[in-house]
Amino acid sequence: MSGISDPRFNGIDFENSYLTGVIYDDESLTLEMDFNLSEKHPQFALPQDGDDSCYRGGYIRFADIEDLQIEKAPEQADDYSIVYSVSGDGRRFEFSSGWGQVKVTAGSVRLALD
């Protein structure tokens, strides 16, 4: 279930999006994703193949990290790309996926779409 109150994420259906990569170091955390955009998103467009879902690649980058907690799922876990839930308020975010659990508090949050 998605519960993000940050307007930058309006129109993104996280439960039907896919996590494609996780990159983290001492300075930042980047979640690479195939975002499922709803009709409310300004970049929404129906695909030409007749599918009713609009996917755009991109990422969420967290920098100026104040707190980062990562609990990776066991290797035999379900498909790591599945997103189970996302919540956040602009500084604090929680992501639950097949990859694992991520809790992050960051001073800088950037969303970019291809």
Image (spheres, rainbow, N blue to C red):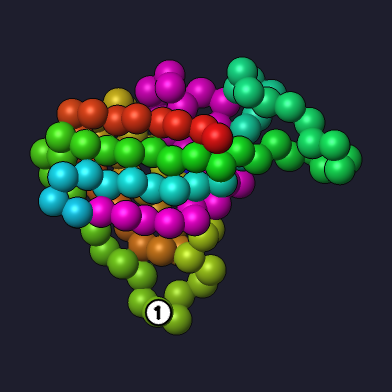
Q: For the point 85% across and 37% down, which residue is it?
A: 48
Decide if residue 54 is on the left or right side of residue 108: right
Q: Is residue 88 above or below residue 99?
A: above
Q: For the point 25% across and 54% down, which residue is it?
A: 24
Q: Is residue 37 above or below residue 31?
A: above
Q: For the point 88% across and 40% down, which residue is it?
A: 50
Quadrant of the image for the C terminus?
top right
Q: Is residue 19 visible?
A: yes
Residue 88 lies in magenta, yes or no?
no
Residue 51 location, quadrant: top right
Residue 43 location, quadrant: top right
Q: Amino acid at mark 1?
A: Glu
Magenta region: 2-24
Q: Residue furthest bottom?
A: 76
Q: How many marks?
A: 1
Residue 19 lies in magenta, yes or no?
yes
Is residue 52 or residue 25 the one in the foreground?
A: 25
Q: Is residue 82 above or below residue 10?
A: below
Q: Is residue 83 visible?
A: no
User: Tag 1: Cα neighbours inside 10 Å, few (<14), some, or many (≥20)?
Assistant: few
Q: x, y (%) of residue 94? A: 32, 44
Q: x, y (%) of residue 112? A: 45, 31
Q: x, y (%) of residue 89? A: 31, 27
Q: x, y (%) of residue 15? A: 55, 46
Decide if residue 43 is on the left or right side of residue 50: left
Residue that badge 1 annotates = 75
Q: For the point 73% across and 39% down, which residue is it?
A: 53
Is residue 71 or residue 108 the one in the foreground?
A: 108
